[in-house]
Image (cartoon, grey):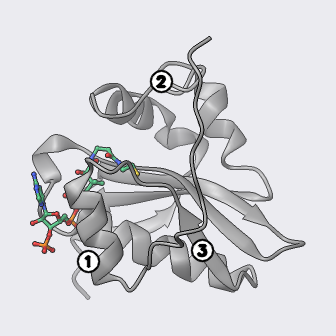
Amino acid sequence: MRASPRRIRTATPKDIPQLQKLYRGVKEIIDYPGQKHDKRYFLAFMSPGRLLLVAEEKGKIAGAANGEIDFQTRFAFITNIVVAPSYRGQKVGSALMVGFAAEAKKRKCTVICGLVYDWNKPMHKIMHHLGYKPSGKTVLYTKKI
Ligand SMILES: CC(C)(COP(=O)(O)OP(=O)(O)OC[C@H]1O[C@@H](n2cnc3c(N)ncnc32)[C@H](O)[C@@H]1OP(=O)(O)O)[C@@H](O)C(=O)NCCC(=O)NCCS
């Protein structure tokens, strides 16, 4: 049987060098402490209650999505999703979102949510295509300190 050209799977520690390269190469994401440089960031998302998925294409990591699973409330929260610039527009991001939802469902989650900046047109498109709705209930407060 021919190997699938794209595979969505949970990440392993072996993926970390490629993940660091991927996250560093994406200018849109703000560097949460260590996110782009520290392998502990990625290791933390491989622990129970967290989820880190990668989209693999011919052995290369084209994108990744990481988030948290709250087993009590059954909420899954997408912290970040990233696709390498050269793979964008090929539904890698959509496939990661579908994969994330499937994994969350396996872990008995009933709701999946995530914050999207107002300027992020591609991400809003993905959310709408996949049936996500703006909650209208959340205001993100920020303060420069
Ligand atoms: C957002 C992101 C993950 C999307 O990944 P992707 O693999 O390109 O996504 P998809 O191909 O599944 O879908 C992207 C959609 O946006 C559209 N799109 C792409 N660039 C666009 C732009 N500049 N303006 C409007 N729409 C755009 C695509 O045409 C597609 O829509 P369609 O299905 O109607 O054709 C990717 O752009 C990325 O990594 N961005 C930087 C990190 C980021 O912003 N993450 C989200 C944090 S909430």
Q: Point out the frontmost of discs 2 and 1.
A: 2
The residue located at (69%, 86%) in the rendering is 110
Q: Which residue is mark 1?
A: 4
Ligand 1 position by quadrant: bottom left
Q: Report, in whole angstroms, how far the alpha carbon at label 1 lies from the one at label 3.
A: 27 Å
Q: Which residue is mark 3?
A: 112
In depth, the one of 102 and 124 nearer the eye is 124
The percent coordinates of residue 144 (x first, y second) are 56, 16
Residue 6 versus residue 11 in the image, above or below: below
Q: Amino acid at mark 3?
A: Ile
Disc 3 or 2, which lies upstream in sequence? 2
Q: Which residue is most to the top?
A: 145
In depth, the one of 144 and 93 nearer the eye is 144
Q: Amino acid at mark 1?
A: Ser
Task: Answer few, some or many: residues within 10 Å of disc 3's Cα (few below 14, many 20 plus, some between 14 and 19).
Answer: some
Residue 3 placement: quadrant: bottom left
Disc 1 or 3, which lies upstream in sequence? 1
The answer to whether marks 3 and 2 mark residues whose Cβ atoms lie closer than 8 Å is no
Disc 2 or 1, which lies upstream in sequence? 1
Secondary structure of the residue carrying tag 2 is loop
Q: Which residue is mark 2?
A: 31
The residue located at (66%, 46%) in the rendering is 45
The residue located at (28%, 70%) in the rendering is 126
Residue 84 placement: quadrant: top left
Residue 110 versus residue 122 in the image, above or below: below
